[in-house]
Image (cartoon, grey):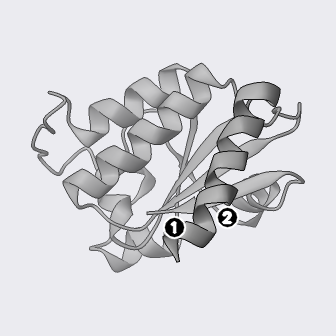
């Protein structure tokens, strides 16, 4: 099977080297759906989104839902990732550089009655008027962690 894929892989690499990576449209955006508060998954999602935001200059929104809402709860002590930062510090840096973080209001209630007063600065509480415009915008890519 690898023999059959070898020409395809080789031709793809040649095309990328000749023509470059696909161009980014002016209205491209990334929506990251983060459902977990597990350290490595959260760090990967936030780190990837932050790089896309700063290096590729694409607007990025991180949507925290299910257990992921705990990442934005300033009352929950957090451990540092191998990067030396906590997920809250990563989220704050992401927002400082222009990223958007939205939390699911129903999920906040479901994980122990979180309110907007529990959120780190800059995080928005979601809802149809906040979440849907960025999720359903044209040329939005959705990535889930």
Give the mark, 2 or 1, whose residue is nearer the N terminus.
Answer: 1
Residue located at (40% from left, 59% from top): 115
For label 1, the SS is helix
Q: Which residue is the site of mark 1?
A: 105
Tell which of 16 and 81 is nearer to you.
16
In the image, taking residue 65 as reference, residue 86 lies left or right, namely left
User: Looking at the picture, how far across and down is residue 116, in whole percent?
Assistant: 44, 52
Q: Is residue 54 above or below residue 136?
A: above
User: In this view of the protein, which residue sits in the foreground, 61 or 118?
Assistant: 61
Residue 14 position by quadrant: top right
Q: How many marks?
A: 2
Instruction: Name the residue rendered at 88%, 35% in the picture.
Output: 25
Residue 145 against residue 111 in the figure, above or below: above
Q: Nearer the viewer, residue 6 or 136?
A: 6
Q: Which residue is mark 2?
A: 127
Q: Are marks 2 and 1 in contact (CB under 8 Å)?
A: yes
Compare residues 22 and 117 and report the one nearer the observer.
22
**Quick check: 16 left or right of 120?**
right
Q: Is residue 35 left or right of residue 5?
A: left
User: In this rendering, is residue 82 above or below 114?
Assistant: above
Image coords of residue 9 (percent x, y): 62, 54
Seen in the picture, residue 130 relative to 80 is either above or below; the reply is below
Q: Inspect this view and state whether residue 118 appears.
A: no
Image coordinates of residue 111 in percent, x first then y, are 30, 74
Is the residue marked by circle 1 packed among few (<14), some (14-19), or many (20+) residues within 10 Å?
many
Label of residue 118 in the image = none
Q: CA distance from mark 2 to mark 1?
A: 7 Å
- Residue at 36% across / 79% down in the picture? 110
The quadrant the C terminus occupies is bottom left
Name the spot of residue 54 as percent of width and height, x first: 57, 21
Badge 2 element = loop
């Amino acid at each position: 099977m690898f023999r059959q894929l070898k020409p395809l892989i080789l031709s793809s690499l040649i095309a990328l080297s000749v023509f470059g990576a696909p161009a980014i449209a002016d209205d491209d955006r990334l929506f990251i759906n983060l459902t977990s508060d597990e350290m490595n998954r959260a760090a990967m999602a936030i780190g990837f989104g932050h790089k896309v935001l700063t290096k590729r200059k694409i607007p990025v929104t991180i949507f925290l839902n299910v257990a992921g809402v705990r990442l934005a709860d300033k009352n929950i002590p957090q451990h540092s990732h191998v990067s030396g930062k906590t997920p809250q510090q990563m989220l704050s840096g992401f927002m400082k550089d222009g990223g958007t973080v939205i939390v699911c209001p129903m999920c906040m209630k479901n994980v122990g009655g979180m309110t907007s007063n529990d959120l780190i600065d800059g995080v928005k509480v979601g809802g149809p008027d906040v979440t849907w415009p960025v999720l359903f915008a044209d040329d939005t890519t959705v990535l889930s962690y």
